[in-house]
Amino acid sequence: MQFSKKWIGATMAAVLMGGLLAGCSSGNENASNAKSSESAVPSGTAAPGEKPEDKSPIKITWFVDQDYYKKNWDPENNLLDKMITDETGISIDFTSGNSDKLSAIIASGDIPDVITLDKGSPQRGVLEKSGLVSPLDELIKQHDPDFQVPKSMQDWFRNPDGHFYGFASFFWAKESFQPGDRIRSNQGLYARQDIMDQLGIKAEDFNTKEGLVSALRKVKDSGTKYNGFTVTPAYFESWIIGNFFGAPREDSQGNLIDRERTPEMLEAYKFLNRLYREGLMPEDSQTLDKNQIQEKVTNGAVFAFTNRTIDWSALYQADPKAVFVHVGPVAGDSGSKQYVDPVSSSGWTLSMINSKTKYPDRIIKLFNYLSTEEMSLNVNYGPKGAAWNYDENGKVKLTDEFNTLNAEDANKAKLKYGNGTLQWLINWLPIQRTTPATSTEDARIKEESTIYFADFTYDMLPFESITPLGGTEEGGINAKIEEQRKKQRAKMILAKSEADIEKFFNEEIQREEKLGYQKLYDYQNKQFQEAKKALGMAFAWPANQKK
Amino acid sequence: MERTLEARHSAPASGTEGSGRRSRWKSQFALQSMVWPGLLFLIVFSYVPMYGILIAFKNFDLFLGVMDSPWAGFSHFREFLTDPNFMNVLRNTLAMNLLALFLGFPAPILFALLLNELTGVRFKRFVQTISYLPHFVSWVIFGGLILTVLSPSNGILNLLIVKLHISDEPINFMGNPDLFWIIMVGAEMLKGIGWGAIIYIAAISGVDPELHEAATIDGAGRFQRMRYVTVPSIMGTIVIMLIFAVSSILNTGFEQIMVMQNPLNLDVSETIDTYVYKVGLQQMRYSYSTAVGLAKSLVALVLLFGANYVSRKLTNNSLF
Amino acid sequence: MNIRSKGDKWFDTFNIIVMTAIMVLTIAPFWFALVGSFNQGLDYMRGGVYFWPRTFTLSNYFSVFADQTIFHAYFVTISRTLAGTALHVAFTALVAYGMSRRALAGRNVYIVVMMFTMFFYGGLVPTYLLYKDLGLLNNFLVYIIPTMFSVWDMIIVMSFFRSIPEQIIESAKIDGAGEYRIFLQLILPLTKPVLAAIALFNGVYHWNAYTDAMLFTTKEALEPVQLFLMRIVTDSSVATKFGEQAASVMPEEAKQISPETLKLAMMMATTAPILVIYPFLQKYFVKGVLIGSVKG
């Protein structure tokens, strides 16, 4: 045991080193904690009275539960780190790991000053209940009353105890939207412009089922080849087609609807099955993964697809005429409005502050600082002035030095400018507003289609609460049902007849009941109702809201 | 067989029960002192943390810790065993493992034997070096290559099949549930043959050349020497590897199956490991995952003892 | 005689054909990966790059080696591989020798106690707390100590030790040699092939290991090269998940690399050193180690 104590001592010493190096300031910190930070006696570089804020050098520890994440605080070479350390006095000692490591750290009771974790991870609830992290609202009241956290974020992450504990990254706060702001979607309907022109197909043709089928049939019948590859008419995803057909998510009483069980979804399966049976969508649409489809797309061998995350840049690079433009989207028999799901609006990660940290005042101010609009741009591109400046239209213009280094070696650029290396408190809205004027045709078309499909999005926030938290029984049921649905989807789309589709559709409902569907649905509906209440809305689905 | 030492090594020096035992311990202090550090190591690093297994019988709550989490009895075991998908994933797991046992297990042995018979030393070394290269290629990349080769639209294999008129239509290998098991086992064999052979190559290196010389004088050909000299000499190693292969019959490679899985073959490709990963670990349901892991371990332990017993009876080779 | 040697010839020819086939099949995926690592990233995504790079570039490798701290990471990896493997082989062999002797009292109990640990694992949290108490967190020794013994390797080595004729040991004993001397001077030299095999297995394990570094260390000074590279690769694929628009405004040249080609370059950067070392181990895999000793 002698051995172990010695090593614990050594480790502790290493951890504390930062604090000790900070010198006498840390002692002052502790003493002044009880009072408001304004009265703290600043020591070191900042002269008293000149600036009210304490910028004495301190070092904080910060854990991120993404195992790929790595950042060495390097104010000497890294311009972003230099900027933050210069302006706040804080150096950050980042560590990272997967959620298992986070569990272990929590179990050991010895957590770092700041923890960033996925908003859906089970550790979030554990931390919030455990008293290991401070309520942010209290810290703000006490130390930084000017810190404006969007109300929707506070409401969304508020616990039953009335407090909220984490600041979310990539959160789309609706109340802070300005005219022109929109949330984008990764769903859509895209087709090759050059082939459309060649065969006389128009974007409007894709608005109806018959129009879409005849457009795809033209591609098939013409036997169009590109680069020696026979062009496949379509790779469509069933859930996106279901959205286009207007599958609702809430009934007229305000209860949650499972889209997968709606008539619109059945219609989508029948439609995709028709495409399959007519040879317009191949069997391998059900077996290829996204990368393999992307490979086909960038080879020019695909005419139309629905997954916006497929990047066709490589195709454009080889042939500037081969671009994908937004078309349609197709509408269903009911004639209801088409929808697409936006990207998650409740954000990605939450950052929390250790309740036993020595520097609660400094860290909450750091949160405030890092979440400002300009810092969001700085953490995304690197510091203003060095990596970018505003152009005459108020858009971001990257500097030549940055562009040169980034082209030469993107990782080197990251080490120098810190672009994209500290996004844990980022707000994407200001970045979207100032997106650099696009230079290439390809980028212009992409931007245009993003705007186009943004009009089909809806406020998805209340629906984001229905994903069961990790570690729960409902989470298990949900995963089992998802697996089951994957199989059944493929069966329906590749079915031999329409009667088979309905058979599979009903069969699936029965199987899901055995897997505990009702329990999952009750949970989801409860979550959904609570979310609506927290957000102060009676109805969440646009069609219901209009009533 | 000659290599069983059990029979040959009868009990050492006899004496009265008590004093004999004491003197036996004393006389083998050196021998015991070699083994004890290993036991101590396992007690510290394996047995001490083993209380973590308790969460299989609890509803593990990270906040409460292993000891204070509420008991759940056998509910996690029950959930797995009564799952409507249980029979399906069990069948797939067993099918792929049995296939691997019959095809995949002998492959590295045959490879090692054939390699040993190569006459050119340079060629032999070259082949040996090359053969273990795929071991270093991750399954994501290796699986991707296999999928490309088998692709119905532009895979080399399908181009050949259509050109040679074996079939008029290209075959969607990965979409055909009947082919999945054999493709999977084949891919594993291809990737692991060289690496798996290392241990047999080491065993063959230990074979007494005099035995070969004697056999040659007796007029044995190459094949006969391989059959009657080399194989019996490495039988001990083969049996040990086989016993462990049998005991791990509920384990399947995880990454490789995830890479090759798609909705069309899910009915035959879902194994215990992939299923529990998806509905347990990925959902961070630690208690459930631990319970299934524990159940699998118990089966493995039974199989290990069983295989060991059978092997001792049949071949006189055994682990213990 | 003639017929037999004719049979041998046929056998040899057959053998060479089979071996060549296996060689081609096994080298192909490795070669494709090597070629891919020298290909431009975006171009690689179009598929069809197999036998030779279509658009040659060194960008992937530049990216892997951009951060100079990688050389320190290599140092950590080499240190743990050398120290870890040496300790592992020595310790495992020592225990295996003890266990190989039928005379060992309590042998059957020991083996069951040992094998039990192959099947049951307490999980990460208890392990983490144990390492914390032992002072192994953030300590180089966390790479070496928990891996210094493996029951599986012990069993393999033990089975080799058992294949040594008992009379060798007996005669050494008559000459007055103690167990440790027999182990060191007699048994170890006789079983070099299996020790080389274990060293290879364990060495490759150490070389590729990063989960222990990820879970139990936080200091950069302890970061092994695999963790270092794993982060570069995952980073470049996660980065676009939320900041997609930022990626699309990057100049075209920045698309020289893609997560796929970067992954291949990384694989090569970590595999190459093993390929260099292997021939040195290979000499132990030659025939007839045993014979010299029995005669002498």
Image (tube, coloured by chain):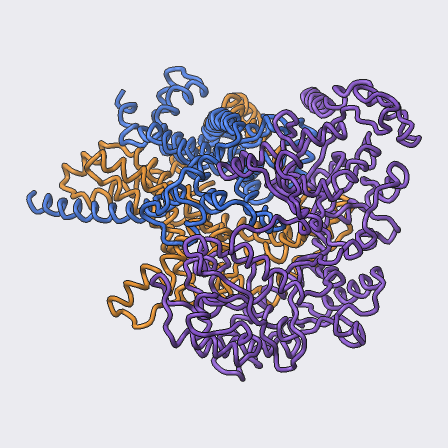
Q: Which chain is blue?
A: C
Res B20 visible: yes
For the C terminus of chain A, the quadrant is bottom right
For the N terminus of chain A, the quadrant is top right
**A412, above or below B111, in the image:** above
Q: Which chain is orange?
A: B
Q: Give residue A2's position: percent from left, percent from top.
A: 70, 20
Towards the viewer: B271 or B234:
B271
The answer to whether B307 appears left or right of A237 in the picture is left
Colour representing chain A:
purple
Towards the viewer: B288 or A10:
A10
Residue sticking out furthest to the front:
A392
Q: Quadrant of residue A412?
A: top right
Q: Give residue B21's position: percent from left, percent from top.
A: 55, 27
**B116, above or below B257, in the image:** above
Residue sticking out furthest to the top:
C176
The answer to whether C65 appears left or right of B75 in the picture is left
Residue sticking out furthest to the bottom:
A499
